[in-house]
Every structure is written in structure tokens, then in C-alpha cells.
Image: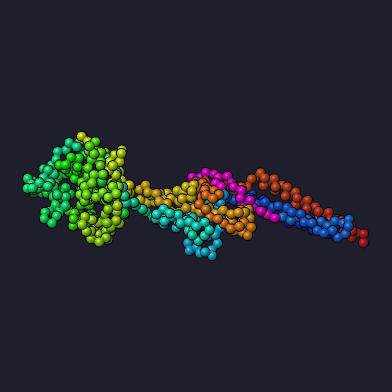
Amino acid sequence: MGINSALLAGVSGLKANSAALAALSDNIANVNTVGYKRSQADFQTIVTARAAAGSYNAGGVTTKTRQFVGQQGLLQQTTTSTDLGIQGNGFFVVTDKPENVQPTDARSFTRAGNFQLDQLGYLKNAAGLYLQGWPIDKEGKVLSDPSDLTKLQTINVTAIGGTAEKTTRIGTKTNLNSNQEVSPAAKNVGVTPPIVTPYQATPTATSPANSMSMYDPNATPPVGVKPDFSFQVPVSDSKGGRRSLTLSFLKSKEPNIWHVEIHASPASDVVSGPGLSPGQVKVGKIAFTQDGKYDPSKDFGAEGLFGDIPASGVVPPPVLRIGASDAAAPAGTDVKWTPDLGIQEQEVRFDFGLAAGGLSQFSTKSFVETINTNGTPFGNLTSININDEGFVAAEFDNGVTRQIAQVAIATFGNTDAMKAVSGNAFQVSLESGTYNLKAPGTGGAGFISPSTLEASTVDLSAEFTGLITTQRAYSASSKIITTADEMLEELLRIKR
């Protein structure tokens, strides 16, 4: 029994060292594989029961291969914005196909973040696995669920195509000359009988309008009232088209008060309600304090440019509202975009009272120093950026940045027990425990490191050293077999 057990022990040594050689070979072959985790064959003794006192039966050796999945490789900088590494714990969630992913389809987990765009705009790594994340809705909210993989979607960075942003805010630094002479039309407002035709912004049941928006010096005789000062403001609509609003000012005979009209240029861009003249968007009065600053607290009632101040005394922000092209015909002093434009409704806030700018009334000539708007024309996709919190953003050539999705990070209780699958990825096993989905940098999950790749954890010097010792151990195991064979041969010679 002793010689036979020695033969079997030698065979087990050959098998065990062959397995160790296979693990070493895998490591050396994947020394440049992004996100690869080194494997190691751990040797274990096999002990058999003794047949009789004083005898010994060799049990031999066996191996169990394990992969150091939790060991992080060195993060190396790249020049590609879609290359991703994870600084800390966790894995990217990936699928084998980009579309029509069903709840029964397998999800894998990987640290290989060498993602590139495929022909459909999906992020796919070198193994052909597609990156998943939580989509972001139109309000900028992340639709996440820490325990439901079906809430994830394959990230597509070209699905939104070109984009435009409509103007929602207008800021200006403009001065109105406090020494401006009051025009005859303004002097005759409310005078009975008037000496000249007085200024009248909107038509009434008894008299037509005589406004600044209808001013035409080339008509015979001239039509409308010449503004004391006016300037145009560019506005982007919901399609990225360029529109223009003209602001016209006429000094009132009342101190520190000006008449204001806002009208579209050309007038055909809007449909004005019956309470307005064609092309008008807003009319009313504004006031200034005695030190020349814009005074939004002056209550003109319905004659104020932006309406009456409520009973609460809280001054509402000056907001201009223009209805959508497909809205119903405007009533009163409402206004909408003309149906031919086919654009969305729009609210524009005017920053007239900013400390560093806005409207002022000082004793100098009227001028416009700056006009700032936040709208942008149509833009095409130029680049994709991903930050350390995993937010995937599309950047357009008009300066607009849109967030598309947030990369999800999956963490496990026992990462080294995960089941390895092809493509340098892993799946859940009984020993690893279930996954937990987290936003990068939260709950123990690592941060995303953009434009980096995680290197293989293989150390070639250690692998080559192991290769030498494994080769020697294999040779030694073969010597056990040849020695046992010679001893059996001697035993057979006794019979002869």
C-alpha cells in the first residue's frame, strides 16, 4: 500500500502543479488586460487513514484556485474621456446586449472600464460588454433604485442628438438720461383737450393707440410716438431660432417715471391680444428712486409694466410670458407666438434691479453697456464627459451641457468569491452575496476616475518566480513516480 500511495501522491503532485502552472499562465497572458485580477493556486494536503500501526499511506496534494477580485490595480491616465476607472470598491454593471434587456437576462460586473462608443452610441468595453446606469429625467432627477437592476438602462450618449435652450433670463446694464426732455406726446397724457395727440400705449373702446411700437417716421404724416430711447434684445426660442424683442422708453411728465413698451421685431412673430397693439408683448410704467436706481416697489396697479403688487407687499420678479404657437387666441393683454413658428411657450425674466447693473436713471446720456441672455441656438454634440460622481454629460457646440445618466456602482460583501465569466467580468455567486447598487462615492462605493484605466494586478516578477518553483515541483513529483516504479521493479525481481 505504501508504494502504491506514493505513486498516487506523485500523480496528485503532477496534477496540482499543472493547475498552478495554468493559473500562472493565465496571469502572465493577461499582464496587459485592463482590470484583470490575478489568480493563484493554493495547495492543500490530502490525508488518508492508516491501514495498520506503524504504516503510512501518502495522501498527496490538491489545489484550489482563487482570484483576488478585491485587489485594486494601479489607475493609469489616458486621453479618452470615456475610459473609466473606479477609485475604491465596486464594479461597473454591464450587459451582453445594449437593447431589449429583459429582467431574466444576465448582468455582469467588471472593473474593465475601457469603454468606447459603438455605432449606435452605446458605451461598450473591449470585451463587448455594455455599460449600464440610471437615466436622468428632464428635471435633472436620477431615477435610481439600490436593489433593482431592471431600473438600470444601457447608457446611450447620442440619443438626445442636437439641442437648443430657449431664453429664460435677460440681464442688462442700461442707463436712461434723467435730463431727458419730456416729449409733447408724453406731456399731453391725461390733458383735456390735448394740444397734440397724446401718447397712448394700447387702444381703448373710444380711441386708437398712439404707441412707440407703431412709430414710423417715414409715414406721411409720421405715425406713433418716437421713443426717447430703445434697444433690441436677442431671444432664443425653443427650437433655437433667433427672435428679437425691442424695449422702448418714453419719459413721463411725472418725475422718475418712464413709459415702457416691449414689442417683437418683426411684429409678425407674435399674436397680441385685443388689449394690445399688433406686435406688442408688454406695456406699462417703471419707476426709479431719487438716487437713480430702479424701484420695483412702486405700485402702479394695472399700469405697472409687470402688473400690480400683491397685498402681501412682496414684489414679484419681472417675468414676461409668451404663449405657445398652438395656444388658443390670446385674450386681453396676453400674447403668444405666431402659429407659423410652431414653438413652445416661453417665460423670460428681466433682471432690471441688479446691484452691478440693471436699469438706472442718472444725469448722463442714455446708453446700453451690456445685454446678457442665457438662451442658445441649436447645437450639435461635440464631446462626452463623465465626472467623479458618475454623471455622464453631453456637451454641444453651442455651450449647452446636458446630463444623460449616472453610472451605477455595484458592491458585494465577499468580492473574492464572485464567479468569473468570459470578458474579464464576474457574476453573483452564493458565497459572494447579493449586490447593492450605489451612486459613486456613496455608501462605501468608490468614486469614478474619468480618463483612467485600472491596470492588471499581475506582478511579472512574482509570476516568473512562481513559474520556476512550479516547474521544479512538477519535476520532483515526476521523480516520486519513477522512484516508486523502480521499487516495484525490485519487488518483482524477488519473485524471479
Q: State the residue in front, 184 or 245.
A: 184
- Residue occupying image coordinates x 92% and y 61%: 495
Q: Position of residue 131 (x, y in %)?
A: 50, 55
Q: Position of residue 255 (x, y in %)?
A: 18, 40
Q: State the residue in front, 422 or 197.
A: 197
- Residue occupying image coordinates x 20% and y 49%: 303
- Residue occupying image coordinates x 25% and y 61%: 328
Magenta region: which residues?
Answer: 64-88
- Which residue is situated farthest in the front direction here? 311
Left or right of residue 382: residue 275: left
Q: Position of residue 86 (x, y in %)?
A: 54, 48
Task: Name which quarter of the figure residue 253 lies in.
Answer: top left
Q: Is residue 82 magenta?
A: yes
Q: State the residue in front, 92 or 351.
A: 351
* Residue 128 appearing in the image: no
- Residue occupying image coordinates x 67% and y 51%: 40
Left or right of residue 62: residue 408: left
Marks counted in the figure total 0
Q: Position of residue 121 (x, y in %)?
A: 45, 56
**As drawn, 213 above or below 177:** below
Q: State the residue in front, 214 or 197.
A: 197
**As drawn, 345 above or below 292:** below
In the rendered image, the quadrant that contains the C terminus is bottom right
Q: Please, which colouring scheme is shown?
A: rainbow
Q: Is residue 343 magenta?
A: no
* Residue 373 appearing in the image: yes
Left or right of residue 302: residue 132: right
In the rendered image, the quadrant that contains the N terminus is bottom right
